[in-house]
Image: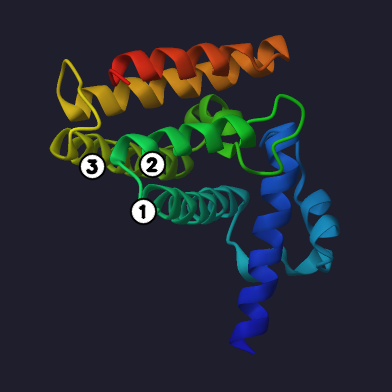
Amino acid sequence: MAAIHGDTRRSILDAAQRIMSRKGFSAVGINEVLTAAGVPKGSFYHFFGSKDAFGEAMMRAYFTDYLADMDRILAEPGLTSAERLMNYWRNWRETQSVDECQGKCLAVKLGAEVADLSESMRLALKEGTTAIVDRLERTITAGREDGSITVDGTARDTAQALYDMWLGASVMAKIHRDIGPLDTTTTITRHLLHL
């Protein structure tokens, strides 16, 4: 029974990520998510205490999956740290499609919106994005050690600046409906890492 409960909860969260990555958080009703997940409408509060609690759970599930993918990319054997890091950015570019990101760009889509709506969702976003920057910092540090990366500042400052830049470029790509900002950011990333 617990597995069914977990599967249903996960189905709701997955459907929400797909829909909200297109429409945003406020524009999506719970019934739309439940219909997309194939879950009876009356069961939402069995899984989540409120829309806020649901939003927080959705963000945490998103970052759990995102960080697992990121860890896989950054641990690819036989590559330098610089190659792993550039593979991560290449994957970012591919999953941040200007038309449809299928739930892969939830932090980009919801970041500004939910930071002012819900403190619990803002904290989930903060924790998730901090975990991303932590991984970038570790990879830059490893790149300095293996000689594949050189940076002018600290590894932490560079990791934070890169993440901020890529997040901003993703927003600009959506505004302009053009992938160009991500291409420019790729060039600047290579420059900052002296690649």
Q: Residue at x 70, y 14 (%)?
A: 178
- Residue 147 position, x and y percent, is 18, 33
Pick whichever, 13 or 179, lies toward us.
Answer: 179
At mark 1, the secondary structure is loop
- Residue 81 position, x and y percent, is 30, 40
Q: CA distance from mark 3 to mark 1?
A: 11 Å
3 vs 1, front mark? 1
Pick whichever, 178 or 121, lies toward us.
Answer: 178
Say how many tags the image has. 3
Which amino acid lies under the numbered mark 3 shown in the image of this protein? Answer: Arg
Instruction: Classify the position of the C terminus by image quarter.
Output: top left
Which amino acid lies under the numbered mark 2 shown in the image of this protein? Answer: Arg
Instruction: Classify the position of the N terminus by image quarter.
Output: bottom right
Q: Is residue 111 left or right of residue 180?
A: left
Numbered label attached to residue 138: 3
* Residue for badge 1: 75
2 vs 3, front mark? 2
Q: Is residue 74 left or right of residue 8?
A: left
Q: Are marks 1 and 2 in contact (CB under 8 Å)?
A: yes
Numbered label attached to residue 125: none
- Residue 80 position, x and y percent, is 30, 42
Q: Residue at x 63, y 37 (%)?
A: 95
Q: Residues within 10 Å of mark 2 (few under 14, many from 20)?
A: many
* Color scheme of the displayed model: rainbow
Numbered label attached to residue 84: 2
